[in-house]
Image: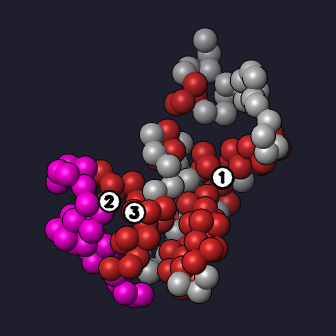
Amino acid sequence: MAEHMPVSLGFKSESTSVHTRRTMMLDDLALALERVPQGGTPADYFGVILNDNVLGKATRSTREASAKILTSLYGFDPTFAVFRILRRYWDVDAASRPMIAFLAASARDSMLREMTPFVLGIGIGKRLRQPLLPRSWFPFILGDSKT
């Protein structure tokens, strides 16, 4: 499915995922979007994160890591349709922000995109008692699929 999604619009289909170590970072995303006006460039977003420390990170290395992860998830580039849509609708309805962020992140994170139907199928309040995922789906997470 992912190989048919246009990279030029901001979609990604890499075999790695920021979700192996982070969440969607909604609070950090909100802080960055508050400080950079619509139409801001990727350099503007990096500037408020790295130089202005809008996220309140203790070290430059954590600011750099956060900027890279946020950029990987959301693009921070108005030339990408995925990010333009996120940016356009972010201020329309604050209650919708988590869903808007999820839609943008799933366009750019193949693991999140591929896992969504599986997670939704589990049901609210249900427990996953055994691994139900085929090992071949994500060998970078589950280990070598040949073992």
Q: Amino acid at mark 3?
A: Asp
Among the 4 quarters of the image, the one containing residue 143:
top right
Left or right of 92, for residue 32: left
On the question of residue 115 being in view, the answer is yes
Residue 5 magenta-drawn? no
Mark 2 residue element? helix
Residue placed most toward the observer, 85 or 135:
85
Position of residue 19 measured from the top left corner of the image (x, y, whole percent): 51, 44
- Mark nearer the N terminus (1 vs 2): 2
Q: Judge the density around disc 2: few (<14), some (14-19), many (≥20) Cα neighbours within 10 Å.
A: many
Name which residue lies at 64% across and 74% down. Answer: 96
Q: CA distance from mark 1 to mark 3?
A: 21 Å
Residue 90 position, x and y percent, is 54, 79
Foreground label between 3 and 2: 3
Q: CA distance from mark 3 to mark 2?
A: 9 Å
Sooner in the amino-acid sequence: mark 3 or mark 2: 3
Q: Which residues are magenta?
A: 36-62
Q: Considering only vertical position in the picture, is 120 above or below 33?
A: above
Which sits earlier in the primary sequence, circle 1 or circle 3? 3
Q: Which x, y percent locates residue 7? A: 54, 65
Left or right: 99 in relation to 91: right
Which disc, if any, is residue 67? 2
Q: Secondary structure at mark 3?
A: helix
> Which residue lies at the image location 60% right of the left edge and 45% below the top edge?
111
Q: Amino acid at mark 1?
A: Arg
Q: Is residue 86 left or right of residue 41?
A: right
Q: Is residue 18 above or below residue 130?
A: below
Say which mark, if any, is on residue 28: 3
Amino acid identity at mark 2: Ala
The residue at which mark 1 appears reads as: 113
**Which residue: 33% across, 79% down?**
35
